[in-house]
Image (cartoon, grey):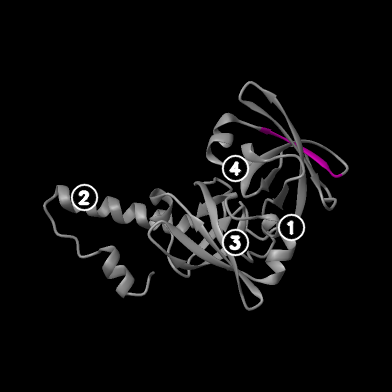
């Protein structure tokens, strides 16, 4: 489990493929203390298992499913990645609950300035957008961010200078892919509501709980 607060960035150093799976090699920009093989580290928001490490060089085994669902397969030598170790039980939950199980990818449509902040518009599939709400939480390349607005096929986020300077976003440009993980709690709420609605329909009951009624009650 992660919080979406990036601890440091690293450089993608390469990969060693065996069929469609392979090892990823990341050179961390800072040394992590008390690392252990087998622990979880989020790389651009993707939960990976640390296989080996030597100094600042980390290696991870990545399965085909991970390449298919995330943007890790698009990394080139020198690409900057975000790194976050798994949340310790006694740590502060400063961002939001992030599982590291990426829902899919989106593309940066535009980057613009709004005062000192940077505004990003990111495209997303409807299967992802259905869980994104204005002022809700989303992880973009593993960064815990607040959604500024939601459109028909995209959403916008505002990046403060600290986040811009200390993550891989400063190296992004229009057209680049990013990993997206929507709010876990929102997905559970949506799933339970759909089950309740389907149950009422099968029993010929009219449900008084709808997405509209929840929005009016202030849940969205």
User: Mark 1 to mark 2: distance in Å?
Assistant: 44 Å
Magenta-drawn stretch contains 63 = no
Within 10 Å of the Cα at label 2, are there few (<14), some (14-19), or many (20+) other Cα atoms?
some
Front of the two marks 1 and 2: 1
Name above or below for residue 148 compared with residue 20: below
Front of the two marks 3 and 4: 4
- The residue carrying mark 3 is 144
- Asked whether the residues under the numbered discs 4 and 2 touch, taking CB atoms below 8 Å apart as contact, a structural biologist would say no
Q: Residue furthest top?
A: 19
The magenta region covers 56-61
Name the foreground residue: 156 vs 46: 156
Residue in the picture at 36% in, 74% down: 218
Is disc 4 placed on a helix, strand or loop? loop
Q: Earlier in the sequence, mark 3 or mark 4?
A: 4
- The residue carrying mark 4 is 71
Name the foreground residue: 46 vs 164: 164
Position of residue 186 in the picture relative to residue 113 (left or right): left
Within 10 Å of the Cα at label 4, are there few (<14), some (14-19), or many (20+) other Cα atoms?
many
Residue in the picture at 84% in, 53% down: 30
Q: Earlier in the sequence, mark 2 or mark 3?
A: 3
- The residue carrying mark 2 is 199
Horizontal and vertical percent position of residue 125: 42, 49
User: Mark 1 to mark 4: distance in Å?
Assistant: 20 Å
- The residue carrying mark 1 is 7
Q: Earlier in the sequence, mark 1 or mark 4?
A: 1
Name above or below for residue 169 compared with residue 81: below
Is disc 3 placed on a helix, strand or loop? strand
Q: Earlier in the sequence, mark 1 or mark 3?
A: 1
Q: Is residue 133 visible?
A: yes
User: Mark 4 to mark 2: distance in Å?
Assistant: 37 Å
The picture quadrant where one finds residue 67 is top right
Position of residue 213 in the picture relative to residue 179 (left or right): left
């Amino acid at each position: 489990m992660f919080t979406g607060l990036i601890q440091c960035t690293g450089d993608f150093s390469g990969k060693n493929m065996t069929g469609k799976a392979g090892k990823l090699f990341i050179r961390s920009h800072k040394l992590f203390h008390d690392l252990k093989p087998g622990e979880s580290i989020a790389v651009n928001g993707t939960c990976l298992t640390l296989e080996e490490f030597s100094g600042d060089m980390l290696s991870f085994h990545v399965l085909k499913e991970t390449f298919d669902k995330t943007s890790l397969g698009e990394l080139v030598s020198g690409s900057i990645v975000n790194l976050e170790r798994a949340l310790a039980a006694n740590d502060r939950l400063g961002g939001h609950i992030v599982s590291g199980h990426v829902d899919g990818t989106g593309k940066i449509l535009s980057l613009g300035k709004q005062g000192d902040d940077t505004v990003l518009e990111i495209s997303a599939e409807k299967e992802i957008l259905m869980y994104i709400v204005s002022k809700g939480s989303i992880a973009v390349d593993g960064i815990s961010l607040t959604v500024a607005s939601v459109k028909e096929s995209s959403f916008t986020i505002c990046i403060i200078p600290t986040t811009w300077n200390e993550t891989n976003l400063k190296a992004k440009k229009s057209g680049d892919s990013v990993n997206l993980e929507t709010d876990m709690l929102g997905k559970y709420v949506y799933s339970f509501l759909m089950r309740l609605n389907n149950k009422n329909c099968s029993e010929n009951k009219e449900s008084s709980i709808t997405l509209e009624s929840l929005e009016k009650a202030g849940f969205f």
